Structures are given as C-alpha cells and as structure tokens.
C-alpha cells in the first residue's frame, strides 16, 4: 500500500508527515491524517498532489503581523 507523504514547498527535503490516508482543506487550513489516526493541521494551501509518487506539496502560510 502506498500512502502519501506531505512536504512544505520551500523545504521539501524532509516530509512533515508520512502515511497520509486523508486530506481535508478548510479555508486556509490543510488537515492531514495518517492511517494510524495521527493528525496535523497546517496553515497553508495545497500546491500539488502527485498520485504517481504519493506526494502532497503544501505552501506554508503565515499571516503577517499587522501592527
């Protein structure tokens, strides 16, 4: 079974999460959940999902401080 790995666009050398079975996008949040129930919420957006390499590429989003 090939489950996905998620990477951040600017630093895509190491996956931020592996064995991803579910992805859900809620506005500016990307919710990732592994086959084992581990979850991670990333503020950002999905840039690309490549099914042939089981790779999810995310663009990390940080709101600028508006002081």
Image: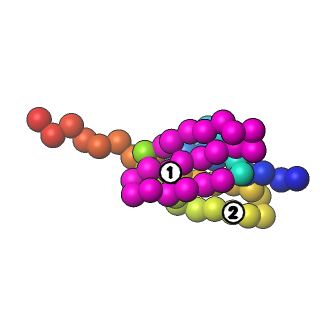
Q: Is residue 19 left or right of residue 14?
A: right
Q: Please check the rendered image and state whether residue 18 is part of the magenta-colored stretch, yes or no.
A: no
- Quick one: label 1 or label 2, which is nearer the N terminus? 1
Q: Nearer the viewer, mark 1 or mark 2?
A: 1
Q: Which residue is painted at 50% across and 51% down in the image?
A: 30
Q: Position of residue 53 (x, y in %)?
A: 77, 58
User: In terms of secondary structure, what is the magenta stretch mainly?
Assistant: strand
Indicate which disc residue 17 carries.
Answer: none
Quarter of the image for the C terminus: give it: top left
Q: Secondary structure at mark 1?
A: strand
**Residue 66 shows up from this direction:** yes
Question: Residue reaching furthest left?
Answer: 67
Crowding near the residue tagged with mark 2, few <14, some 14–19, many ≥20 C-alpha atoms within 10 Å: few
* The disc label shown at residue 30, or none: 1
Residue topped by disc 2 = 50
Q: Residue shown at 55%/56% (left/top)?
A: 24
Considering depth in this image, is 13 or 8 the residue closer to the camera? 8
């Amino acid at each position: 079974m090939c489950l996905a790995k998620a990477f951040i666009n600017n630093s895509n050398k190491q996956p931020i999460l592996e064995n991803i079975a579910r992805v859900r996008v809620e506005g500016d949040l990307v919710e990732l959940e592994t086959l084992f129930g581990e979850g991670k919420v990333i503020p950002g957006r999905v840039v690309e999902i490549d099914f042939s390499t089981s790779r999810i590429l995310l663009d990390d989003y940080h709101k600028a401080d508006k002081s």
